Image (cartoon, helix red, strand yellow):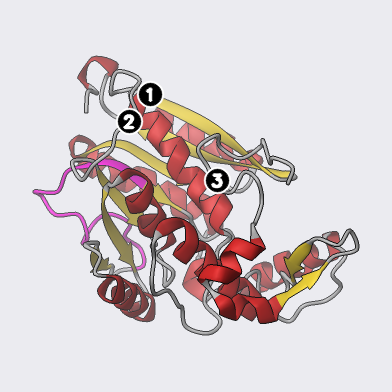
Amino acid sequence: MAIKSMLHPRNQHREGYDFERLIVKSPELEAFTKRNPRGQMTINFQDMDAVRMLNRALLMTHYEVDFWDIPASFLCPPIPGRVDYIHYLADLLAESNGKEIPHGPEIKALDIGTGASLVYPLTGQHEYGWDFTGVDIDPVSIKSARQICQRNELKIRLRRQNNPEDIFQGVVGPGDIFHVTLCNPPFHASLAQAEEGTRRKWRNLGKGHSAELNFGGQNAELWCPGGEIGFIARMIEQSMNIAEQCLWFTCLVSKKDNLKPLFRLLNKAKVAELKVVEMAQGQKTSRFIAWTYYPERQRSL
């Protein structure tokens, strides 16, 4: 298999999907596989059941997750891209750790909008052993994430955010300290915008029309008032209130054009440093924005 060199060097999925290995670990996947015109094994990525089964096999095979499932119609995230974010966060933290990648439960990570899939804590805990706290506003997502934790006997703290206007307030206590936050924010400003985004994606992929939202997804996972900029703006504003409780705040940014207004907000917040980390995944480039209130001399882990 050709190496997907665009993924992070430590990403286990750089060589693509080894379906034979995945099927050995999760035989149910075989029913969803097919051969593409080049004779390679693949799945129909427009089929949400197939994507869910692939994710289950990937988590079982690569991340020692014995049980994984999510409610029907919930967001089914692509594992390789999600875990890339984790690896780049490890690189970011290494800058404050003598250039060594930090491992172990001493590293505290806060996952904003952890979702029903719990994908960031599952992969991040396996790869680096970090201590994760996941928060979400949706009770069904929290219930699903809690079931995944219990069935796999994992120690991941889960907290319900009761106020959709709040990001950190209500879920970060005065005694909490985090080394890093991570977040995959809602991209769209409305349900109609989310649906149009899905139609555009399937057209670009030559897949025709799909009635399904992009890889599934509930309202809180795909859209919120103000869209991505509005969500991250609230995150920046509230981060000022817990500036000393977190070393690096980070969040994915789907559109490059959104960076400029976010830079203005961060400069207004008088952060000590801000970064944009680009991640190339297949044919697209994603990125996350990172900011800290700590001067460089005070950032040792």
Say which quarter of the image contains residue 292.
top left
Q: Does the magenta stretch include residue 173?
A: yes
Which label is found at residue 273? 1
Question: Magenta span covers which residues?
Answer: 164-181
Crowd around label 2: few <14 · some 14–19 · many ≥20 (10 Å): many
User: Horizontally, is 182 left or right of 196 in the view?
Assistant: left
Mark 3 and mark 1: span between their CA atoms?
17 Å
Q: Main secondary structure of the magenta part?
A: loop
Q: What element carries label 2?
A: strand
Residue that sits furthest to the bottom in the current view: 72
Residue that sits furthest to the right in the current view: 37
Mark 1 and mark 2: span between their CA atoms?
6 Å
Which label is found at residue 253? 3
Q: Mark 2 points at which residue?
A: 292
User: Horizontally, is 210 left or right of 135 in the view?
Assistant: right
Residue 269 versus residue 72 in the image, above or below: above
Residue 109 in the image, given as x and y percentages of width and height: 29, 47
Q: Quarter of the image for the C terminus: give it.
A: top left
Say which quarter of the image contains residue 154.
bottom left
